[in-house]
Image (tube, grey):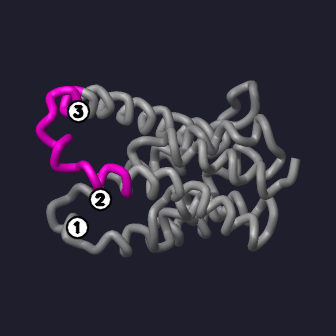
């Protein structure tokens, strides 16, 4: 099958079922390497880092990265458009009949049950990223020295101090990037 068609199908499905936005796409993206050789599971952490560091929605940035990695520029565009298409279709359909649905008890109930499912998807994504970032291999060997874990803990504490909470998020992203470069050396 043509790689562009495969990209379209895979990312259309991700866009259709990843309810909850960008973070909800992460479990799907972590599953793709088991079916395609477009990237490795470990690359998801790099995709997430790039997606979080660049403007725009995480899911779209990650789809663009994965598509580009699989089939170059056109692959990136195919994956991105495929991810967005289901949402676009649903939004257009819902916009036409939004008023009649907004007060419907069944719709309210459906959204009430979707929220915990989305929370579960996001929790799965967080666990997958944590596991991939800190552990490697089937033996579960620790990848980073304990010093890095300590630095992460200090970083988290600093971010929650009242005086430092007022700093712009870009400052924290820049600090994280600098720390990543320092630990890579």
Labelled disc at residue 164: 1
Other residues around mark 3 within 10 Å, as few (<14) / some (14–19) / many (≥20): few
Quarter of the C terminus within the rendering: bottom right
Q: Is residue 135 left or right of residue 25?
A: right
Q: Are marks 1 and 2 in contact (CB under 8 Å)?
A: yes
Q: Is residue 158 left or right of residue 42?
A: left
Dot 1: element: helix
Residue 59 visible in image: yes
Q: Residue at horizontal 48%, vertical 63%?
A: 52
Q: What is the C-alpha distance between the residues marked 1 and 2?
A: 7 Å
The quadrant where residue 161 appears: bottom left
Q: Which residue lies furthest to the left in this view?
A: 103
Name the residue nearer the viewer: 131 or 39.
Answer: 39
Which residue does the numbered mark 2 point to in the structure image?
Answer: 158
The quadrant where residue 120 appears: top left
Labelled disc at residue 119: none
Where does the magenta region start and end?
92-109
Residue 78 position, x and y percent, is 68, 63
Q: Is residue 64 left or right of residue 96?
A: right
Up/down of 153 relative to 66, above or below: above
Other residues around mark 2 within 10 Å, as few (<14) / some (14–19) / many (≥20): some
Marks 2 and 3, the one that precedes in the sequence? 3
Q: Residue at horizontal 53%, vertical 57%?
A: 85
Name the residue nearer the viewer: 77 or 91.
Answer: 91
Which residue does the numbered mark 3 point to in the structure image?
Answer: 107
């Amino acid at each position: 099958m043509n790689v562009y068609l495969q990209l379209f199908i895979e990312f259309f499905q991700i866009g259709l079922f990843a309810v909850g936005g960008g973070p909800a796409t992460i479990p799907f993206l972590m599953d793709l390497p088991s079916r395609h050789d477009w990237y490795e599971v470990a690359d998801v952490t790099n995709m997430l880092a790039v997606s979080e560091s660049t403007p725009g929605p995480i899911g779209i940035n990650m789809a663009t990265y994965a598509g580009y990695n699989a089939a170059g520029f056109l692959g990136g565009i195919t994956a991105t458009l495929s991810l967005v298409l289901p949402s676009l279709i649903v939004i257009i359909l819902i916009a036409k009949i939004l008023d009649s649905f907004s007060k419907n008890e069944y719709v309210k109930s459906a959204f009430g049950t979707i929220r915990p499912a989305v929370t579960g998807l996001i929790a799965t994504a967080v666990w997958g990223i944590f596991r991939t970032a800190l552990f490697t291999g089937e033996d579960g060997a620790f990848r980073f020295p304990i010093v890095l874990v300590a630095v992460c803990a200090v970083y988290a504490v600093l971010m929650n101090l009242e005086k430092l909470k007022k700093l712009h998020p870009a400052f924290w992203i820049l600090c994280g990037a600098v720390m990543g470069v320092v630990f890579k050396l």
